[in-house]
Image: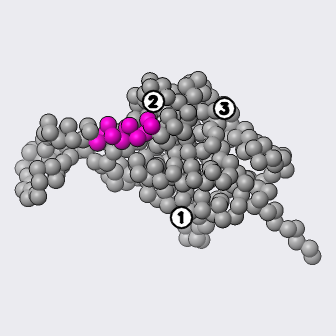
Amino acid sequence: MIWPLKPSSKKQIARIEINGAIASQTREQVLEALEEVEEKKYPALLLRIDSPGGTVADSQEIYSALKKLGEKIKIVASFGNISASGGVYVGVGANHIVSNPGTITGSVGVIIRGNNLQKLLDKVGVSFKVIKSGPYKDILSFDRDLTNEEESILQKLIDSTYQQFVETIAEARKLSIETVKSFADGRIFSGQQALELGLVDRLGSEKDAFRWACELVKLDPDKTECQTIEQPKSFVNRFLNNRSQVKSGVGSAMNWLEFELATSGQPLWLYRP
């Protein structure tokens, strides 16, 4: 029997998904996938984003990797149900962006949150004795309010991170700083509005984005395969994943809670409805 030859990756379009909140695990998976795309010499990449954003540094590292790869191949981003805040930051690392008209996007800005449990701790009679090397070492401690000086420190941190966000979008989308700041106030908007603002290039579905990627590298969209790059799963992981689909709502809630706890006190590029 003669087995058909597997199509060359040079005649295929690679595809990478970014789903959910962006954190260290997402960064690791995406960077590994981008390396595979480069090693196998795919001519183009379809980047599907369905994310409310996430941590600052992880989003920046993905963006930087996309920009570097985009110098060698064509990258078209496709915005799904939501591509907000850090999702936007990652998305502008692509050469081109396609958004559904109803995609929730925008939310360009920075947020940092801490939890103040002082009143609750007072009720149950719990207090803490803190020994610290400097006055701000326990900033955002959950057992007391922020001081005015601490609020000022955190606001400067937020302002610096916000400026990085604005400058990156302005450079990537060829917009002025003033134009970006006109909509970079945390508001969300639709994909249709994003097109009018210059944040995306076209309106369309993921299939439309795929066809555009094919056309950019002179491949026939009707004859070209789209190869999704993802980490291989062991039998145990596949089994657990199948079982978890039954309790997907609980799993999603637990994942979000884990993210909230892990990022408490960190500046985030994240849309929080």
Residue 56 picture location, percent across and down: 40, 47
Observer-nearest residue: 51 or 94? 94
- Tell me: 221 left or right of 125: right
Return the mark for residue 228: none
* Element marked by disc 3: strand
Image quadrant where one finds the N terminus: bottom right
Return the mark for residue 177: 2
Mark before the other along the chain sequence, 1 or 2:
2
- Tell me: 152 left or right of 95: left
Q: Residue flagged by tag 3: what amino acid is it?
A: Arg
Span highlighted in magenta in the image: 157-167
Which one is closest to the eye, mark 3 or mark 2? 2
Q: Residue at x 8, y 52 (%)?
A: 127
| Residue that badge 1 annotates | 240
| Residue that badge 3 annotates | 202
Residue lying furthest right = 1
Q: Is residue 30 magenta?
A: no
